[in-house]
Image (tube, rainbow, N blue to C red):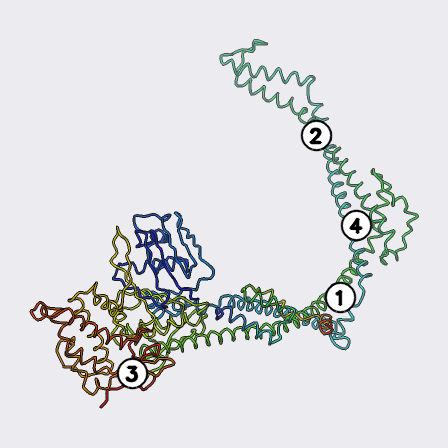
Amino acid sequence: MTKRIKSIKLESFKGATQPFTFEFDTDKPITLIFGENGSGKSTIVDSIDFIFNENLGSLEDKKIGHSKHKYLHSILSSPDKLKVEIDVAGLINIGRITKSGDKVIDKKNKVPSFEILRRSQILNVINAEPKEKFNEIKKFIDVTNCQKNEDSLRRAKDSVKLNYNDASKLFTQSDDQLKRLWEQEGRSGKDYLTWAESKAKLSTKELDKYVKDAEKIIRYFEKLEQSINDVDKKSEEVVKLKSSVEEKTKEYEKAKKDSVDNAEELIKTLQSAKSYIEKTKSIRECPVCKQLIIPKELISDIDKRLTDFKKPIELKKSLDDAEAKYKREVAVLESKKISVQNDAFSLFNFCKDTSLGEIKSMKIDWGKNKDLLEKSESYNEKYYDSSIKLYKELSTAKKEIEKELDSSRETLRQITAIKTNLETRNEKKIIASESEKKLKKLTDLHSIVEKTRKDFLDSVLADISNTIDEYYQKMHPDEGIGKIKCFMKSGGISSLDILAKFHSVDDIPPAAYYSESHLDTLGVCVFIALAKHYNRDGTILVFDDILTSVDVEHLERFMKLLSDLGDEFEQIILTTHYRPLRERYRYARGAVGNVSIKELRNWDIDKGMYGENTENYLTDLKKYLVDMGFDRQIAASKGGVLLESLLDHLTFTYQCKLPRRSHPPYTIADLYVGLTKKLSGALKIEEIIIGSPNKELLLKPILDKLDSKSWIRNVVGAHYNQLGMELTDKEIKEFGETVVNFAETMICEKCFEIPGRDKSGSYFECKCKTKRLHPLKEPK
Amino acid sequence: MKDKPDEALSKLLIEKIEKSKLVDKRFSEKLKKGFLLGNLSAEDWELFVEEVPAKEKINDKAN
């Protein structure tokens, strides 16, 4: 069962300002939609794009800002009124748009895929930069998932390579370090590795313990030394303070002798007197003894006496301060001596139990010094002095311990370095070896994946290139162009290029040498080939006004190509504003058997879009020959035009000689001149009837009959004259019916095609091979 | 019906990788699924080429 579009219903969608339904003839795989510019062809194509590809169709390429969706609904309407309904073989697909511009698409699962080609894309496929070319067709050769996996494989390879390099580097470093240590040791043993392994096996337990104990005892010594130093310093300070107190005592005693009794009371009195004199500026005599005074001199005298009386007081204060400080420092000194006692206590207790040989060998009699092994919370001079004495005795061992400690530390450092380097060396050797294996596998995998991907794309593109070329040769046989090669540009995974032949030169960029129309047809062929290559579940091809002006020959070839494609795709929809294409279909000129013709009439903002079926010329003529619809002028005129078309086809097919004139076109009479007696005598239609002998019919009798009546077309169909008026309806009808007979003889009833395919090499045949036209060439 | 290019290439790559025996068959399913979905990570690839532990090799043979 075919899955073709049956109908498209549009409401408020682009040009459909009024509800519009467009019906398709699903019996025919190809639908030609003809319409002059602005009749709504792109509206129909955009509605297909909207639902099946969920995009904005022709608006996508327009530079109208980011909110393109707001131009999708009809002008003077609103987005919420927009509705597209497409019936594909009974499956109803509906598309709407919300006010905010979100698409709401209800697309049925089983509909075919849709490939839409617009004119702008043709130019991109052919003329654009390789990257843009690739973008245009990437969905046909898209291997994104494989590419992602290839990328992650490459990352894995790089990461393992990094691990391998790191492990190798660390292996070499530790190996070199072991060699260096071995050399420093005088290269003892069989080799550096044997030496290192034996060294690494050595136990460092005793050495560790010695270092720990030695470090601890040194710390005890140092702490005690520091405390003793503090006591010494403080003792010096206390001695100085003591002598200062003594000096101050002497000074004070002397000053006290020179002073008066009740000095403090006298000082207050003198200070009051001085203040009184200073305030009383007019004073001239003493208020006590009434003697004459000079105030300035008296104040000076008072100041001198005050200084003398204050001295012992100040000395007493200074003495008191010095005594207080002395007492404080004596207390501090005592606390420092307690610290010395405590630090010594810690040192002695450690020494008593230590296994350090340097101490043990001193054979200290701890029983004799047992008081010093107990902690004293207060200062005790005897205890203190005994502690200092024992400390000094023990100090003789400290230097030996320090010396031995340095040596032990160095030995320990060396063994640790050997162990660490040996461990690193062995560990990194394993990692490097494993990484190397993994790296090799990943490198091999990457090569396989990369090569397969390249080969795959090359083969796909070669296959596509062949198909393009096959189609292109159908369009342009023997024109010296073609030999199309599509390939991925080296070094780029998203870059596509196309090369072709131009006469004797291969591999030229077609955009540089081909004419515009040749490039157009190349773009169309590229698109069709790609669509054909990945034709899944039937594909519906849509061509949106891709043909501009094409000459008759190429138009016929295009029609033939399209007709052939009708068998390969589910449905082909072709919109065009190019009237000659429509006309050629109507006159059965070319491959038209599987084509239905629709027409869009001029669009109007109030009435919206309007479409109708377009009948072929033969059916059209027959309508005016039946009694009810008979029209003398129309029948004569249409009969003449159809006859002209059929004669044009014959003279064109046999390349007949026609009268040379400055201004064609040729008249019916001219065309008859072209058909020589030999040719018209040989013209024969052969009809293949399955199960019966082939039916043959010579065309000469019909041609002769029509030749004798062809003047009717002019006198009745085109002019006002007496002769035309005198002709009976029967005579005009007979002319029309003879043309119909001629057309029906020539045109295949099944595929509605005039035999024009010369593949057999002996005759022309129609698409369905039911009718043949003889001869293949004009007899000489 | 033809496969999409991605699917077609994925199938081809899976076939070639399996033929190369560079990936242990324990990972066949993950390889196939990951290839079709395009979600294999660098860690997955590293896992695929891990050495098969000797014990598992013996078990595989026994099976």
Q: Same chain, marks 4 and 3?
A: yes
Q: Is residue A184 above or below residue A254?
A: below
Q: Which residue is mark 3?
A: A696
Q: Secondary structure at mark 4?
A: helix
Position in image of residue A187 (x %, y %): 74, 75
User: Where residue A121 appears, x then y in whole percent?
Assistant: 35, 66
Q: Position of residue A471 (x, y in %)?
A: 36, 76
- Secondary structure state at the residue bearing disc 2: helix
Earlier in the chain: of badge 4 and badge 3, it is 4
Residue corresponding to mark 4: A220
Identify the residue under disc 2: A321
The amino acid type of the residue labelled 2 equals: Asp
Q: Chain of mark 4?
A: A
User: Is residue A27 found left or right of A351 in the rendered image?
Assistant: left
**In the rendered structure, the residue with mark 2 lies on which chain?**
A
Q: Nearer the viewer, mark 2 or mark 3?
A: 3
Is residue B34 toward the left or the right of residue A103 in the image? Answer: right
Q: Secondary structure at mark 3?
A: strand
N-terminal of the pair, mark 2 or mark 4, is: 4
Q: CA distance from mark 4 to mark 3?
A: 132 Å
